[in-house]
Amino acid sequence: MQAIKIFADSTCDLPTAWIQQYDIGIVPLYVTFGDTNYRDGLDLETPLLYKKVDETGKLPKTAAPSPSDFMQAFSPFVAEGRDILYISLSSELSSTYQNALIAAEEFPEGRVTVFDSLNLSTGIGLQVMKAVRAAGEGKTVKEVVSLLEAVRPQVETEFVIDSLDYLYKGGRCSGMQNLVGSLLRIRPVIKVIDGKMTPAYKIRGSREKALDQLLNNALSRVSEMDNDLIFVTHSLADEDAVRLEQALREKTGAREVAVSNAGCVISSHCGAKTIGILYTKSI
């Protein structure tokens, strides 16, 4: 048993098999339809999320885990004598980080460490996997955090959003923008910069054109990549994800290219067919 237990939250979008294999603790965020709360990834999966949105015509609300949720998750492992390192969803996007800090204060000093990923989806997952491997090598919490501080600004997160519908329903673009964008087949590209979701540019034309641009953007930086791990993360875009995975595997020489499914919280903000390529640059 490792001395350090690595935790993340449900927005890290790591493959379930990896979470089990590497003994990663997951604290779920909440997705709320009307008066009903669902735990992301436990009570609600992405296909059912979209079905509910179609039925109601409304997006759900999302909420951070409470300090109590974090305390309940951490307590059994602290009781075992293990130290906790929790890597959170960006503090610029959610109160998840702050609630985890509140929970950490309820444990003896130094037993629970909270690290702000300043990212989302597998932009968090990349950092979690770095932490898991470092902890497995016997590094201390302080040493793992030092590694993460170096890795964090090197994470590249870029998504193509297939439709403006979810941005419109979520109040992130106007009805006119949605209409014009749909008519012109405009697909926004979102990057994570300084912990925030930032519109980087727009691609006009076919989905294939948008995916080619996403791929070419990544391939243009192969010389800068840390070729340890690249993620292709998507929301119900399996065929496209496989195509991007194969291209990245062939053209980057990465040790591993993994496909990951976006959970309910990420999907509720971006919509179906959203797809991204995420990697870290060499330190």
Image (spheres, grey):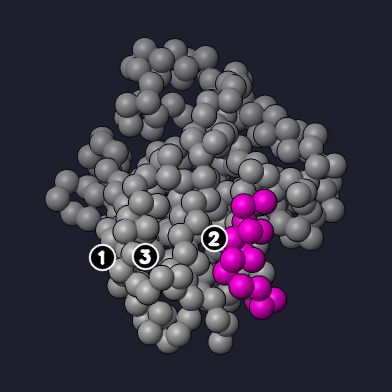
**Rendered image: mark on residue 104:** 3
Q: In the image, what residue type sits under mark 1?
A: Ser
User: Callout 3, which amino acid?
Assistant: Ala
Q: Along the line of sight, which residue is nearer the eye, 271 or 115?
A: 115
Residue 16 within the magenta-colored segment of the rendering: no
Q: Which residue is mark 1?
A: 68
Q: Position of residue 103 (x, y in %)?
A: 32, 63
Disc on res. 89: none
Mark 2 or 1, nearer chain start: 2
Q: Residue at x 61, y 69 (%)?
A: 132
**Real-space Cα separation, disc 2 to disc 3, in angstroms:** 24 Å
Q: Nearer the viewer, residue 264 or 19?
A: 19
Residue 14's mark?
2
Q: Is residue 273 left or right of residue 151?
A: left
Q: Which residues are magenta?
A: 136-150
Query: Where residue 221 sits in the image (x, y, percent)?
Result: 79, 37
